[in-house]
Amino acid sequence: MADQPTDFLKDYQALAQQSWDAWTRYLQQQPAAVSPFAPPSSSTRADDFMTRSMAGAKAYADWLRSAATSGLGQGGDDWQRQMQGLFAGMGGQPFTQAFAGLDSGAAQSFFQQWQHWMQAQGSMGAMPGLAGMSGFNAMPNFNAMPNFGGMPSFSAMPGFGDATAAFGFTRERQLQQQALAAAMREYADMASRYQSLIQQANAQGFERLQAQLAEMASTDKQVDSLKGLYDLWVDAAEECYAQIALSSEFKQVYGAMVNAQMRVRQLQQQQLEAACRELGLPTRSEVTALGKRLQELRREVRSAVTQQPAGAGDAADALRAEVVALKRKLVEAQKKADASTAVVKTAKKKPAPARAAAPKKTAGAKTAARRSK
Amino acid sequence: MNVPFQFDPASLLAEISTFQQKLSAGMSNVRGMVEPEYANTPREAIYREDKLTVWHFKGDKAPTAKTPLLIVYALVNTAWMTDLQADRSLVRNLLAQGEDVYLIDWGYPDGADRWLTLDDYINGYLDRCVDAVRKHHDLEAINLLGICQGGAFSLCYTALQPEKVKNLITMVTPVDFQTPGNMLSHWTQNLDVDLFVDTMGNIPAELMNWVYLTLKPVRLNQQKYIGLVDILDNPKELENFLRMERWIFDSPDQAGEAFREFIKDFYQGNKLVKGTLTIGGKPVDLGMITQPVLNIFAEQDHLVPPDASRALAKKVGTTDYTELAFKGGHIGIYVSGRAQREVPPSIHQWLRSRD
């Protein structure tokens, strides 16, 4: 039995190495594509499941390894220093992976789209007949953009920079490019603010975990496993995240970030449409317009079909419609009567929730409330 | 001060090595598995239109209920949550109780459905589904069971077509969309939904799924899969887990116009509870709902907080209003063991006394 820390580490390292190698080999076989919305995605459902699950498990396994080798819980009273030491080794934030997908991963995939877009534009500009026609190769001279954590360098990306006065044959295209660059800049700003809030949630989660552990220490309670410690962290992290996610600032930043990304996408679509029109290709807006017209036609046809029997004297349908109309009038009349008599109203008694096994009929309370009006 | 954790080296080694071994060994189990099937309770289609199908389920015995029950599921995710697996099926349990169960399967909207509005869904599709069931039984009115967004649709429909609904059941249905703690609603308030829909067209399912995952990011993106390691060597539990994953991520896109209207009118305008909602130009007055109403909600629901559902009590016109609080969450109300024991019998008991 390994009863000394050195023996323990020796045993552990051998075991970990063995299983780790096998697992890593497996993971390396899995493709990991990036979607515009979420980092974990791939070609098949099985792969999607594997990539998603293994990313979380891998972060956890990393943490287990670090915890084992850090001496956490292996003696000594300064547990806070041990915790800080362990988490400092992981950039000060445990399980960044769990939060990372919320900001940098998703945002980065969007920036990758942007890069592909700019590259595609460059290629189109090189196409015969397009270069002079629509200004695909007449990109303004963009300057550096501010960067933020985890994002690709904007200065290295084509299409970013301050707007300059547009003129000449390609004036309209220059303006479009400038609008697109401005929209992208706005998105970058919003994504940066969003990322700050996520990092704030992560940091506060760790602080809350420490506070909870301190409270446990003062009441003689103990965490008896690393999984127990992990679960405590999850609770703390989720609580802090929820608090931030329900704040006014988050609401504002979240909305602004989504809106900014939509503006970028819309401007990209407009430019793509212009190119398609010039090439004589059908555009998305044309298809959309056709779909809209088709749906309107379908409504008209159905309306014509359903109205005919009533006009032909379907007595039952006519009576049914009359009953509904009368009922509606009755409700309206009741409301008017209630408003005009406006005497002291007894507040409608709030029905007490019944437990699942025994649904509680609250008709009595409601009827009483009505009578009292 | 005491120390909040003291790990015995041997037990620490055991914990870590067990995790590693389970993880390594379990990978082969996952790799060989095929996608698990849903419960697939025997059923036949009685009505089809565009992408939707109305299914009529067949139980082991003939229904004892005189009035059929039509389940109206949400447009978000698929209706198979109600018939997930043989021993976790709302549909099967309702059949076993003696109910005659129908279900609207909305299908998977595509580009052709981009312009479907809430009017098309509620006054169009839903009305024709109700008519199909009425015709099948030669009845004036049937029972409706609306789930989540489908519950909101059912409320609108019942207010607009009261003569076609005998009893109304709402499950985890939002009525007040702006109660405190409603994270989803909070995030939609500053959304420029016109720009959003004009740009995206139909709303991709993947985007919807991602938003739901970010409501509890660590729990749903990481902790859940760490817990999975414990069941990797248990084929039955692993199959159940994968079936649920299938349901969570195999979800339909949202028709753009309907999405625009739902976000604007329900989430941002909160018009259903305010009484200012119109569908297809017709006012939706919950006071018009005078038939019996059973409102079922989940006490730990993070998608539709209980208060969002409870708001119905003060709005409906009926004198026969019942609430049923389930101890569980938005999904647990269909698939947990407690749900199988408590929810279908409660629904049946309530309906039977009003059949």
Image (cartoon, grey):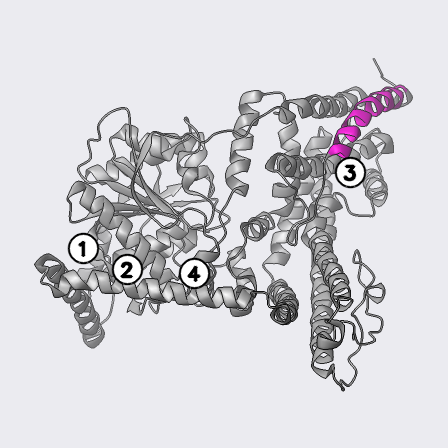
Q: Would you name the residue on which mark 2 appears?
A: A348
Q: How far apart are marks 3 and 1 (CA)?
A: 70 Å
In front here: B221 or A163?
A: A163
| Residues at marks 3 and 4 touching, judged by CB atoms closer than 8 Å | no
In front here: B345 or A357?
A: B345
Q: Position of residue A58 (x, y in %)?
A: 74, 35
Q: Residue furthest right?
A: A6
Mark 3 against mark 4, which lies toward the viewer? 4
Q: Would you name the residue on which mark 3 appears?
A: B1
Q: Position of residue A159 (x, y in %)?
A: 78, 70
Q: How far apart are marks 2 and 1 (CA)?
A: 26 Å
Mark 1, secondary structure of its residue: helix
Q: Is residue B320 left or right of residue A139?
A: left
Q: How far apart are marks 2 and 4 (CA)?
A: 34 Å
Q: Residues within 10 Å of mark 1 (few under 14, many from 20)?
A: some
- In percent of the image, x 41 and y 42: which residue is there? B79
**Magenta stretch?**
A7-29
Mark 3, secondary structure of its residue: loop
